[in-house]
Amino acid sequence: MPEIPSTMPAVAYLRSLPVADPESLVDVMLPVPQPGPRDLLVRVEAIAVNPVDYKVRQNTDPGGEPKVLGWDAAGVVVGVGDAVTAFEVGDEVFYAGAIDRPGANARFHAVGERIVGHKPTTLSFAAAAALPLTSLTAWEGLFERLGLHDGALKNSGTLLVTAAAGGVGAMAAQLARALTGLTVIGTASRPESARFARRMGATHVVDHHKSLPPQVAAVAPDGVDFVFSTAGTDVNMAAYADVLKPMGQIVAIDDFGPVEIGLLKSKSISFHWEFMFTRSLHRTPDRAVQGYVLNQIARLVDAGILTTTATTDLGTINAQNLREAHRVLESGKAIGKITLNGFPPA
């Protein structure tokens, strides 16, 4: 392995600014982080961008200190802490990281080994970087919050996935189609997003810009058993209460204000939150589950059962390209995942 330098290029923000402002994300040089006892030091080869990136940028002002975003990465382990047991220098890895630590939009990144997986061998670094955050969110939402059983094709019924052409929606559709017996209804509003949702595993696609109940009833006359709500939970709560069967379940991942939760009472519908960073943020004893899940995702990818959701690569990791990635995500029109590859030459 080449010698690790003392400083590294990174992309950060110093103040919360609109994405059109050239200072909203800037190129900086920062010290290379020192890994803790259970940390890996990873040379980042590719990243993917998620809505959480721009939401943090918009809502958390660092007061002039550089704050590095980025919670999807793939790279090579170049250093390990004294207590690391599952990885060695030279291992290729992928992970989403922890929201209360610096992100991966940097040449080197320190991350806890328990939330890291071995990269799929059949994917490039960029294709692999598209997977961790959305795969973990979809897996936890389906198999932990909704209580489905991965690999149990006897799971029957119908799952409604909103924004099924988005990062999480596409992974939820893929996992449900591959590992359960559920019929997947995805929502999308444009022909190109509907095509992508079907390619990702949706058997049926309905338009989330139109009333959902009559469209869902046309393909699932008896109603649906589960809703994976990736967007629009507040505006769709009445529709969910309508289309869900008695004792149905909702899992939601989006941010919203007050909702009429009482609409769910007469059918005894359960509501669950899914936040992928809960385990790392609260240091739960079981946070190594995320490393296990990522290794299962890699196995399923290498077996040809799952595929990457990477659709757009914007080039090298720099502030200009990341600003463009944030702009596209903020528009709400992204399909699949946006990735960036490597750093400009020194």
Image (spheres, helix red, strand yellow):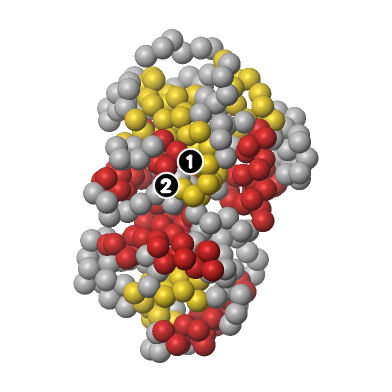
Residue at the image point whose x is 36% and y is 33% from the top: 93
From the image, tell me which residue sits under label 1: 72
Q: Amino acid at mark 2?
A: Leu
Residue 336 in sight from this viewpoint: yes
Q: Residue at x 54, y 12 (%)?
A: 6
In the image, 302: left or right of 186? left
Q: Are marks 1 and 2 in contact (CB under 8 Å)?
A: yes
* Kind of residue sitting beneath label 1: Asp
Q: Position of residue 306 (x, y in %)?
A: 32, 53
Task: Please give the label number shown on residue 131.
Answer: 2
262 or 147, nearer to the observer: 147
**Above or below: residue 246 compared with residue 181:** below
Q: Is residue 31 visible?
A: no
Distance from Cα at disc 1 to Cα at disc 2: 8 Å
| Quarter of the figure with the N terminus | top left
Q: Of label 1 and label 2, which has the lower sequence position?
A: 1
Please report the residue visible at 38 percent of the width from the left and 73 percent of the height from the top.
Answer: 203
- Residue 200 appears at what percent x and percent y? 40, 61
Residue 177 sits above or below residue 224 on the image: above
- The front one of 63 and 164 is 164
**SS category of the residue bearing label 2:** loop
Give the quarter of the image for residue 244.
Answer: bottom left
Residue pushed farthest top? 3
Q: Position of residue 125 (x, y in %)?
A: 41, 35
Q: Which residue is depicted at the point 38% across and 26% down?
A: 76
* Rendering coords of residue 253 (x, y %): 51, 60
